[in-house]
Image (cartoon, helix red, strand yellow):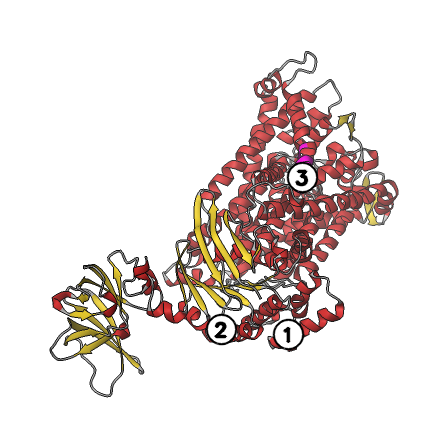
């Protein structure tokens, strides 16, 4: 390498400084303000740990921490237990309808979690369809509210992540490893547990971390289905939003505790997975085979029922969106009333759901490409700093980031609260780490010599980057951008903190309509959201399978 | 076409010096090969010339112009990379034209030159294909055309044949040599394959641990290597301890060989490098190193023997196959050496006492 280990004040040096400035302004500064608010008494201006003492001394608050851990760990374990075998079956067996199952799983993973929560309430809640149906036969279905319901909804929502990760890792396992295991007398379940699982452990850990972080930070699900079972994000939200008194300091303290916890979990996972990593490279990927007759029904039953459970909430919501309503109550018959109301009253939120993520996406793609380049090709102290800063949002729960941004930008000269810009900024900061990771992965695949070839042929550095490197990254970046887009349109936990009447998004609208009991309108809105998601995923499939630039 | 002069090159990674005080002169129009085991610094040196690696000390001149501070994109260098580095998102023609477009030539000129080199490298018929539709050898031709079309002052090639299979490697070796001579361009070629280096080069620089061991023509390097490393790295050889006494090499058990070039050499312990084909096997009795045939391998043109000497060391011997009976394992033999061909090194293996420069110091 040319001496890239030292900072140089060239075009890339300037870009480095600009990204650092952006991160300081929009991430570090708000977080610092939040930390300040947590430890400084708003009346006296003195440093105090009173807020932290309050949290840990009252079981009303500290129990929520325990609850969150219980919920997140259970959801993570269940997601891995469901996602891994499903990925394994879909990799080694020929299964009819596999392509459809794959798509359905991706759709399930991309829908907003709280929609699942409220759909399950309609299905299994006190007056849910299934509950009422079973009650006719005198069967009492166990209570869906509280711990069980939260774990059910989160697991069904998040196992697709484990599935997608595990599927990717399994594709990198060479068939000869399985053949060797069989040859040495290890087959079937034993081979799965002794050979396959250990090989994909690092991937499962990564997926597990993601599931844990998501479930730990999920605000909508426990809010809707938790009832008395209050988790951490719920208490954080209620303390921050509550209209009585100045609880901002206390909310800030809770936010800081949340960040500390997620950081510890993140670092633990990093430590464990660094100790268990393998380089896998499949020359001959695993061949699909016909399942044996004894296992066949079970494989089909498992795969189809898991996927069915995962998409059931979406389907049911879509179905209810076409039901006739009278006021807030569903009545027999079908109509498009819900849609009429949705477009009439809340049409603005549909617009917002497209405009805000679009704006964010443009910045995310540009920043991700530039930062990926700095991190991969210009490794020095400053770019490492960019790398680390860009990862911070990964461990900051969405609600916390929302509160931090509001805290940081609620006074002049940086009066951003209530604007569309603050929502855009929030999305950028939250999604950037993921897009950077994927761009870094793509860039690492491109040998440096390609760019050197361009330079030796007379292209300048910037020209070599934009004419040669970026086009080679393009298909991967577009694919990553679409996935970012899909997660951004279904984002709730930050938007719920930052929105105002003018910047309400679809997810916020669904959430508020559900709380008001307008199930019909909420169903119509979430169906629109689902349609947007599915359409985007179709585009994603098209882009991803189109002419793949191979290196 | 330029000559390249590298003066006291130094390359450091942190505190680790990879190349120290390296000086070479590369003549105009020659194919100059950097040859050495992996990790010897040959690619690093090439990339310093190209401008992709920084230079911590010393200078590089093309035709007397100092290049140290000139940006790689302005050095007018053609470079062929180990993995070819063909732009996968451009057609063959676009790849070849890329450098010309950067030089802002007129459209017609670009077209004409591109066509010329596509034809020279015999890839005109693939001009509108994407690179992933080409075989390895064809990609190699594209890489070469792309490097040459910009009429560079020097051509740098970094292990260009290592990704090809054996048969294609031979073919492309010929293509590269032929093209290089046709165009007459000064070329620096990096390889770890000594046979490839012998076949293709005008001059070879043998490198080890970031330093030059020997610069010379293939013939000279093979026949009169400057030290034991070069002797063992280029081709195969047997290293036999011996003594020099009164201008004679004395092997164990008193086999003495008189060498004219050792006339003024003082008596000392030496290492004698005898290549497999520089032994003569004498089945009967007489003068020679005594040994025992351990195994033989008949290879058609030649027969290879492994002979164990009295001191327990094994030597490899190659003889042209004869019509008669081969020597059988277990047979006692006497070995003589072709005295004008062997090389004698000092005990450390650092100086070849047979080379005339040994006296010049």
Asked if disc 3 and disc 2 are in contact, CB closer than 8 Å, the reply is no
Question: Residue A43's x, y, as percent?
Answer: 70, 13
Is any part of residue B126 visible from this angle?
A: no
Residue at mark 3 to residue at mark 2: CA–CA distance: 48 Å
Report the residue at 60% width, 60% height from top.
A453
How many other residues sit within 10 Å of disc 2, few (<14), some (14-19) or many (≥20)?
some
Quarter of the figure that contains the N terminus of chain B: bottom right
- Image mark 1: chain: B
Report the residue at 73% width, 44% height from top.
A363
Question: Residue A478's x, y, as percent?
Answer: 69, 54
Report the residue that reaches farthest toward the top.
A44
The answer to whether residue B277 is left or right of residue A325 is: left
Q: Quadrant of residue A222?
A: top right
Check the image and report above or below for B79 versus A357.
below
Residue bearing the label numbered 1: B118
Which residues are drawn in magenta?
A: A15-24
- Image mark 2: chain: B
Mark positioned earlier in the residue sequence (2 or 1): 1
- Residue B321: mark: none
Asked if disc 2 and disc 1 are in contact, CB closer than 8 Å, the reply is no
Residue bearing the label numbered 2: B173
Is any part of residue B207 visible from this angle?
A: yes
């Amino acid at each position: 390498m040319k001496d890239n280990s030292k900072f140089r004040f060239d075009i890339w040096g300037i870009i480095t400084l600009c990204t650092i400035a952006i991160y300081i302004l929009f991430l570090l500064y708000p977080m610092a303000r939040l930390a300040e608010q947590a430890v400084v008494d708003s009346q006296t201006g003195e440093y105090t740990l009173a807020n932290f003492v309050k949290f840990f001394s009252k079981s009303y608050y500290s129990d929520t921490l325990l609850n969150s851990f219980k919920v997140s760990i259970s959801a993570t374990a269940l997601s891995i237990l469901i996602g891994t075998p499903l990925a394994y079956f879909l990799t080694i067996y020929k299964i009819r309808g596999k392509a459809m199952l794959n798509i359905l799983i991706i759709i399930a993973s991309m829908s907003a979690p709280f929609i699942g929560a409220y759909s399950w309430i309609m299905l299994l809640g006190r007056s849910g369809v299934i509950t009422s149906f079973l009650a006719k036969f005198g069967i009492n279905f166990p209570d869906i509210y509280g711990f069980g319901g939260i774990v059910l909804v989160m697991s069904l929502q998040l196992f697709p992540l484990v599935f997608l990760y595990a599927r990717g890792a399994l594709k990198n396992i060479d068939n000869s490893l399985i053949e060797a295991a069989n040859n040495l007398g290890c087959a079937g379940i034993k081979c799965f547990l002794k050979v396959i699982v250990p090989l994909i452990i690092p991937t499962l850990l990564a997926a597990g971390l993601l599931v844990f972080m998501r479930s730990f930070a999920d605000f909508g699900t426990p809010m809707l289905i938790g009832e008395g079972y209050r988790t951490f994000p719920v208490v954080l939200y209620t303390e921050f939003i509550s209209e009585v008194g100045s609880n901002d300091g206390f909310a800030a303290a809770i936010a800081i505790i949340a960040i500390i916890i997620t950081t510890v979990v993140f670092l633990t996972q990093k430590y464990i997975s660094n100790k268990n990593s393998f380089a896998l490279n499949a020359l001959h990927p695993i061949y699909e085979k016909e399942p044996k007759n004894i296992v066949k029904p079970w494989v089909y039953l498992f795969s189809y029922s898991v996927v069915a459970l995962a998409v059931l909430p979406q389907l049911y919501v879509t179905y209810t969106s076409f039901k006739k309503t009278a006021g807030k109550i569903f009545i027999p018959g079908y109509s498009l009333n819900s849609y009429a109301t949705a477009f009439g009253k809340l049409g603005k939120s549909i617009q917002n759901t497209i405009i805000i993520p679009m704006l964010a996406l443009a910045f995310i793609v540009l920043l991700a490409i530039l930062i990926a380049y700095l991190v991969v090709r210009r490794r020095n102290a400053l770019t490492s700093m960019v790398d680390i800063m860009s990862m911070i949002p990964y461990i900051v729960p969405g609600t916390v980031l929302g509160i931090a941004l509001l805290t940081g930008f609620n006074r002049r000269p940086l009066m951003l609260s209530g604007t569309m810009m603050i929502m855009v900024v929030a999305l950028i900061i939250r999604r950037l780490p993921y897009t950077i990771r994927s761009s870094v992965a793509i860039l690492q695949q491109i040998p440096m010599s390609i760019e050197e070839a361009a330079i030796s042929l007379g292209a300048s550095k910037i020209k070599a980057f934009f004419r040669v490197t970026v086009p080679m990254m393009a298909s991967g970046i577009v694919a990553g951008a679409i996935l970012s887009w899909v997660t951004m349109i279904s984002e709730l936990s930050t938007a719920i903190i930052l929105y105002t009447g003018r910047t309400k998004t679809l997810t916020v609208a669904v959430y508020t309509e559900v709380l008001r009991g307008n199930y019909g309108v909420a169903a119509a809105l979430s169906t629109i959201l689902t349609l947007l998601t599915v359409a985007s995923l179709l585009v994603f499939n098209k882009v991803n399978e189109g002419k793949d630039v191979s290196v | 076409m330029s000559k390249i002069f590298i003066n006291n090159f130094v390359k450091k990674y942190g505190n680790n010096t990879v190349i120290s005080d390296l000086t070479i002169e590369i003549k105009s129009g020659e194919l100059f090969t950097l040859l050495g085991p992996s990790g010897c610094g040959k690619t690093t040196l090439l990339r310093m010339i190209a401008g992709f690696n920084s230079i911590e000390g010393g200078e590089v001149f093309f035709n007397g112009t100092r290049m140290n501070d000139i940006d790689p994109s302005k050095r007018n260098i053609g470079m062929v990379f180990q993995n070819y580095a063909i732009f996968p998102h451009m057609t063959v023609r676009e790849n070849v034209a890329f450098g010309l477009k950067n030089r802002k030539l007129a459209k017609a000129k670009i077209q004409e030159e591109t066509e010329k080199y596509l034809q020279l490298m015999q890839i005109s018929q693939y001009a509108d294909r994407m690179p992933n539709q080409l075989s390895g050898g064809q990609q190699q031709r594209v890489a070469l055309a792309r490097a040459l079309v910009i009429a560079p002052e020097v051509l740098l090639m970094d292990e260009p044949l290592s990704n090809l299979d054996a048969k294609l490697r031979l073919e492309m070796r010929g293509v590269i040599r032929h093209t290089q001579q046709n165009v007459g361009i000064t070329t620096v070629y990096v390889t770890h394959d000594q046979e490839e280096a012998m076949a293709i080069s005008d001059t070879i620089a043998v490198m080890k641990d970031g330093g030059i061991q020997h610069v010379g023509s293939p013939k000279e390097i093979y026949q009169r290597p400057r030290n034991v490393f070069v002797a063992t790295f280029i081709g195969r050889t047997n290293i036999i301890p011996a003594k020099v006494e009164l201008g004679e090499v004395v092997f164990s058990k008193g086999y003495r060989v008189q060498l004219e070039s050792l006339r003024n050499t003082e008596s000392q312990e030496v290492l004698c490098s005898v290549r497999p084909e520089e032994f003569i096997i004498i089945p009967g009795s007489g003068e020679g190193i005594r040994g025992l045939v351990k195994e033989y391998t008949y290879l058609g043109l030649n027969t290879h023997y492994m002979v164990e000497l009295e001191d327990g060391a094994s030597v490899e011997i190659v003889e042209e196959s004869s019509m008669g009976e081969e020597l059988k394992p277990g047979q006692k033999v006497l070995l003589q050496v072709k005295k004008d061909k062997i090389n004698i090194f000092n005990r450390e293996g650092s100086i070849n006492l047979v080379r005339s420069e040994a006296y010049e110091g």
